[in-house]
Image (tube, rainbow, N blue to C red):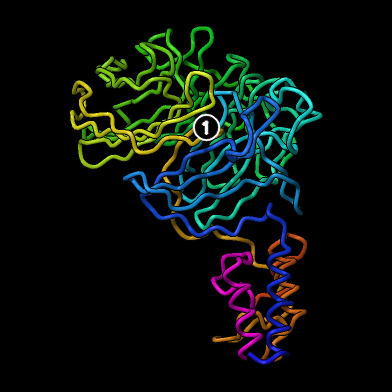
Amino acid sequence: MHATRRALWATLMGLVVAMPAAVSFADSFVPGDLVVYRVGDGSSLLANTGAAVFLDEYTPSGIVVQSIALPAVASGANNPLIASGTAVSEGLLTLSTDGRYLLLTGYATTLPATASLSSTAAAMVPRSVSRVGFDGSVDTSTALTDFADGNNPRSAVSTDGTQLWLGGADGGVRYTTLGSTTSTQLSTDSKNVRQVNIFDGQLYMSSQKGSLRVATVGTGLPTTTGQSITNLPGFPVTGTPDAFFFADLDGSPGVDTLYVADDTTGGGQIQKYSLLSGNWVASGEFDAANVHGLTGVVSGSAVTLYATTSGIDGTSGTLYAITDTSGFDGNASGAVNTLATALTNEAFRGVAMAPSGEAPPTATPTPVMTPSPGACVGDCSGSGEVSINDIITMVNIALGSSPVSACTAGDADHSGDITINEIISAINNALNGC
């Protein structure tokens, strides 16, 4: 490589290397894989003053594919997202109903906090909500000053990555939208919520307080105050449910089978319930100590469950897989297999299936210029070559400080943003010519 080209390469790669770690340039998730919410980077003891958060992707056989770090500092529109290192109830993970996004919660502050995170006022330490796309992109622009005030943020769910329903240890089930700073309390029936999730067009929640355990929130997907929260008919009003998963196994429309992660009953169980004559009836259980997170995949009448534990004190973790072949109204049957365990000074929280699919539609920007078919990736000005200024523009778009309309030729996959792979393609075009 000639000296001038070597110098150009060093300059351009320096731009990429200098980009803050808070900007995530992960690979796309693989459909069918699992994603685990992990706290801790292994370098220091987990503490209630906070720990870094990662999303670890696993194959169904337990092989690690990649780890995505959530932002530890603010960058552009993105807020930090950290979690308590010892709060077992935090970190539940859900998949949006359109299958494109993972949703999770944390605290919008840097490490370490000066006191226990869960005791902080949300007005001082906003509760952060993250939307992670199927392409690995991370959006933590939502930081709420009225969610889980003085207590633990626990879960979030969405239909499309924009509408958000939330649950925490105080303030009840809430609704907001991506990028907001406040939210709407949907009901006063229960202030202490574990997981919120959506199945078959209905919003559900779990709780360990009062007379509610697994319950419906209003009808459908409510967004306004005054909703009633109703325990599922026949479901016990005892126990300690966290995550839950509904399935349709009887061949008729509507969910009819429910699996619940109960982290203390019998030392920890995944409980199965069947909907019979309008009531949810117990159909056996799997022993899983301190189980917390839960998701599943349906194949015919069989359900493969994936579950996570955080240990008795929230500072460890195990990822389990179970295939229940008993079908609708059958007594839960299958072996509990260990897929992975958390390393020292790391802990697991929730688990969800990996997102997949094409990027959701985005508003069409007003382009600086529209590249012609086959235009050179990174040629922002349409000059026929890629300059250092073009690369700088693409880096600024990736950081969120410039709109994608500033370099439509850099968005090669038309995803609405600039990825590290597109920047590298542009660097190669700068070095070798379009």
Camera-side residue of 270 and 221: 270
Which residue is rendered at x = 65% and y = 41% of the image? 177
Label 1 neighbour load within 10 Å: few <14, some 14-19, many 20+: many
Q: Is residue 70 visible?
A: yes
Q: Position of residue 320 (x, y in %)?
A: 35, 33
Question: Is disc 1 placed on a helix, strand or loop?
Answer: strand
Which residue is rendered at x = 20% and y = 36% of the image? 301
Position of 390 relative to 31 (above/below): below
Question: Which quarter of the rendered picture does the C terminus lie within?
Answer: bottom right
Q: Is residue 219 rendered magenta in the image?
A: no
Quarter holding residue 11? bottom right
Question: Which quarter of the rendered picture does the N terminus lie within?
Answer: bottom right
Residue type of the residue flagged with mark 1: Ala
Position of 90 relative to 36 (above/below): above
Position of 400 relative to 119 (above/below): below
Q: Which residues are magenta?
A: 409-434
Circle 1 residue: 347
Q: Position of residue 343 (x, y in %)?
A: 49, 36
Q: Position of residue 432 (x, y in %)?
A: 61, 89
